[in-house]
Amino acid sequence: MGDSERSYRITDLDHGDRPRERLAALGAKALSNAELLAILIRTGIQGMNAVHISQNLITSSGGLSGIHRMSYARLCAQRGIGPAKAAQIKAAIELGRRLTAAVPEEKVRIQSPEDAAGLLLYEMGALEQEHLRVVLLDTRNHLIRVVEVYQGSLNSSFIRIAEVFRDAVREQAAAMILAHNHPSGDPTPSPEDIAVTRAIVEAGKLLDIDVIDRAPCKVLL
């Protein structure tokens, strides 16, 4: 049987190279993205085992964030996936989203840019439209809640400062962080982004609401 006709399976790999066995022995953190995805996919197709399918999917979609943004129908159409595997992948992604959104008994505290990113990036990284959100914090930088201010094609000239601060005033927030996604994938702030951020910072001074743009946190606009 030629290579083009051979059906590759996970069991063709050495025992120590199989994703499930590696996870059991070394823990999930030791596995590559393709190996973790292969555990969800489970079975391969002719010429490709689950690891090959996973790596191909990751490459063709532009990474895990690309799979996250992909619709169920589009995911079903990928080589070696189909409805059942697509459902497993989407279910795992949704469980991850719910886990990050779950509020623990102890209030979330934002002490660094990484904390803010961890709170927002999982969901906002998959959004196909632009969104402007505000993270409201109390006097000890504990999370009050995250508020969506705008959705759609954002033009900085149309952002109303009063709208940005509306919920912060209602909740008596002591500080806030701005979060603005860039669906293009380029996180570089535009000159307009920088200008409107500065205007919001100045408005915050008048309202005695700190728009955090210095240590320990930075504006994510």
Image (cartoon, grey):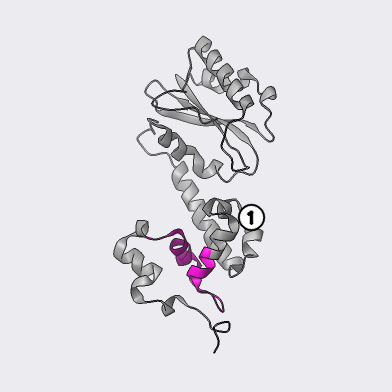
How many marks overall?
1
Is 36 contained in the magenta span? yes
Is 19 contained in the magenta span? no
Residue 72 coordinates in the image, percent (x, y): 62, 58
Q: Residue furthest left?
A: 25
Secondary structure of the residue carrying numbered label 1? loop
State which region is magenta: 31-55
**Image side of residue 98 versus residue 82, left or right:** left
Against 113, residue 14 (above or below) is: below
For the residue marked with disc 1, what is the amino acid?
Ser
Q: Quadrant of the N terminus?
A: bottom right
Against 54, residue 200 (above or below) is: above
Residue 149 coordinates in the image, percent (x, y): 61, 29
Residue drawn at (48%, 47%) of the image: 98
Against 29, residue 115 (above or below) is: above
* Relative depth, front residue between 75 and 60: 60
